[in-house]
Image: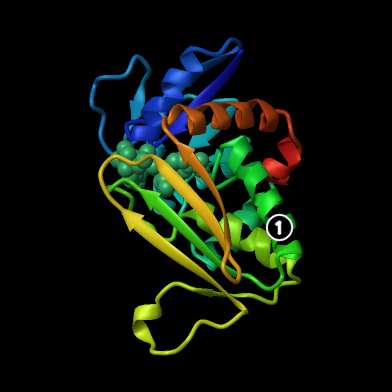
Amino acid sequence: MIRVLINGCNGKMGQEVAKSVTLTPDIEVLCGVDRIDTGDNNFPVFTNIESINLIPDVIIDFSIPEATFNILEFANKHKIPTVIATTGFSDEQLEKIKEYSKNFAIFRSANMSYEINLMAKIVAELSKKLTDSDIEIVETHHNRKIDSPSGTALILADSINNALNNTMNYEYNRHAKREKRNKKEIGIHSIRGGTEVGKHSVIFFGNDESFEITHNVNSRSVFANGAVKAAFFTVHKDSGLYSMNDMF
Ligand SMILES: NC(=O)c1ccc[n+]([C@@H]2O[C@H](COP(=O)([O-])OP(=O)(O)OC[C@H]3O[C@@H](n4cnc5c(N)ncnc54)[C@H](O)[C@@H]3O)[C@@H](O)[C@H]2O)c1
């Protein structure tokens, strides 16, 4: 039986992970960590890293970057494989995560859906064929999301940019300038509202025609189930930084 610690356990995703774990054989929630203990969970919740007195086999983190680094310190101390699903890290923070992964296994993906990672591969292939097109990415999320653009929009942009030999620039804010778009830019746009779980479109605009691929998530269970799969994948791995590409 694999015992998991959920970091950010009282958040929307933390609760979804707890549900997913309950429905999955051979894994159970050992404990959770969050800012407050609501008393609504059927596992112990720690509000302070120093007071954690249970050692899990694996950690699943859906929180905020600051809380991710708190739990990484704990994971580092006990060499606990960790699945990071939190988004919104700076480049410097991503470097720090890479450093930690030299000591124990870390799986990180800004999107735990298999289909989104498949989409990243497909748009990379398309971008090599539709070389004359203008590429724009549009992402839509609920009104509680803090970071923008979404980590997933960046996964898609990076995948395209990689396929094009890293020749593209990302344009987040056309409002700030008055000039035409150029061929070397990928426009990335964020829409926020309501309860939308997560929608990503990549649009290839050509002359008199356009090609659009959209992925839409209707339930957070998609991400929770993906994170639980990642926990099974990571739990017995040696130190290193793993991603969806390694799992599929
Ligand atoms: N990788 C993916 O597939 C994926 C999918 C959905 C969401 N996310 C990301 O996961 C994160 C959480 O999303 P959410 O919708 O559950 O947000 P949420 O705001 O509902 O939950 C975040 C939780 O973290 C807790 N938290 C804040 N500070 C903390 C601290 N110092 N220590 C412990 N816990 C702390 C909050 O109290 C809250 O319960 C976000 O970064 C989001 O973008 C990733």
Whether residue 13 sits left or right of residue 85 in the image: it is: left
Answer yes or no: is residue 4 visible. yes
Q: Dot 1 surroundings within 10 Å: few (below 14), some, or many (20 or more)?
A: some
- Residue bearing mark 1: 126
Residue at screen point 39% across, 60% down: 190
Q: Residue farthest to the bottom?
A: 178
Q: Tell which of 76 and 3 is nearer to you.
A: 3
Q: Position of residue 95 (x, y in %)?
A: 61, 62
Residue at screen point 39% across, 51% down: 140
Q: Position of residue 203 (x, y in %)?
A: 55, 59
Whether residue 127 sits left or right of residue 78 in the image: it is: right
Q: Position of residue 94 (x, y in %)?
A: 57, 60
Residue at screen point 48% across, 86% down: 180
Q: Tell which of 84 and 182 is nearer to you.
A: 182
Answer yes or no: is residue 78 visible. no
Q: Tell which of 160 and 131 is nearer to you.
A: 131
Kind of residue indicated by mark 1:
Leu
Quadrant location of residue 194? top left
Q: Position of residue 31 (x, y in %)?
A: 43, 23
